[in-house]
Amino acid sequence: MYKVPVGVLGASGYAGRELCGLIARHPTLELAFASANEQRGHRARIGTTEVTYVATEDAPLKRAEIVFTALPHGASALWVGNARASGARVVDLSSDFRPGGGEGEAPYGLTELMRAKIPGADIVANPGCYPTAILLALAPLLKAGWVVPGATINVSAASGVTGAGYTARPDLLFAEVAEDFRAYAVGNEHRHLAEMQAVAKELGGKDNDILFTPHLLPVARGILATITVPVNEYVDDPSALWRDSYRGEPFIEIVDQPPALRDVVRRNVVRLSVTKAANVRQPTLIIISAIDNLMKGASGQALQNANLLLGLNEQAGLPV
């Protein structure tokens, strides 16, 4: 059976290794190369597959039909161009082509919301992990016009340590993270904010600010976001809007009880709950959103987009 050759640039990071593992288990794809400059020549066992890393400049780009670029932000655009010049289509996991300040323009790969734009694309800008959890939670509200015009949407979200990347940092050592919980990027200046604001406006936001405070969780993976949104009025069953909006979506789960990380870890899903806030004068909805930051927040969604680029079953090779 013919398998589609794909390559991964930046394969030694958390997202890159996750991608290699997904490709190894995919029924239709095979890994043509995996690059990692600092580990060039080294072998790594990913699941049941052994991978030998090559230098990025030595990657045989012409052998791949799809190239996943999981390189650092700012370094990816050059290699996206090189991959396109070799004839490959690209799913880029960096911020270089995302809305809100990327170096180029490409269809935004928030799959459930932008599906129609993806199949014919040459480059797909894979969303960030926080934006995936937050924008999929907000989209039905924004599209329906329920959010109070000019109101501030408050987001408090916590991510596992893999969200900070693979580079060694003293503040991410086990003894610094374990038994602790802390906010970071306080002051509404996180690099994902511009991406979220740009897409929220595209989805129908009415001059709404997003006040975003991320936190570091002492776990390896997962994101849990608490989103409070002022709305024009309450309805009897607010979650019905989300159920209708995402009906038939295999990777979105609407639940009655607030989701937990254990519900989503190692799964390519976003799990959402919606609750009316009591004891407030302004009608407000509380949305809880949970994802695996390496799966639906990065590699899983990248593979979901690649499946669409190749005309494959969108669910192929993805854990649900």
Image (spheres, rainbow, N blue to C red):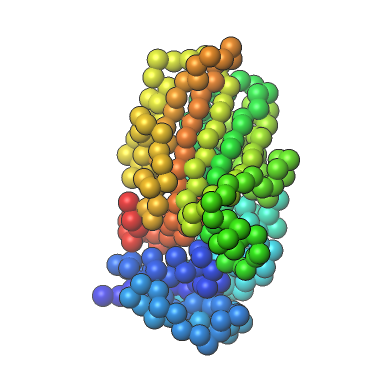
Residue 218 visible at all: yes
Where, by quadrant of the figure, is residue 105 drawn? bottom right
Quadrant in which the N terminus is drawn: bottom left
Residue at left offset 61%, top offset 20%: 148
Question: In the current view of this chain or complex, which residue is farthest to the bottom?
Answer: 41
Residue at left offset 58%, top offset 12%: 281
Horizontal side of residue 11 vs 99, given as left or right: left
| 119 or 260, nearer to the observer | 260
Horizontal side of residue 305 vs 180, given as left or right: left
What percent of the width, then of the height, locates residue 149? 64, 21
Where is 297 relative to 89, above or below? above
Residue at left offset 50%, top offset 27%: 286
Where is 17 relative to 229, above or below? below
Where is 319 relative to 258, above or below? below
What percent of the width, then of the height, locates residue 129? 54, 51
- State how many labels appear: 0
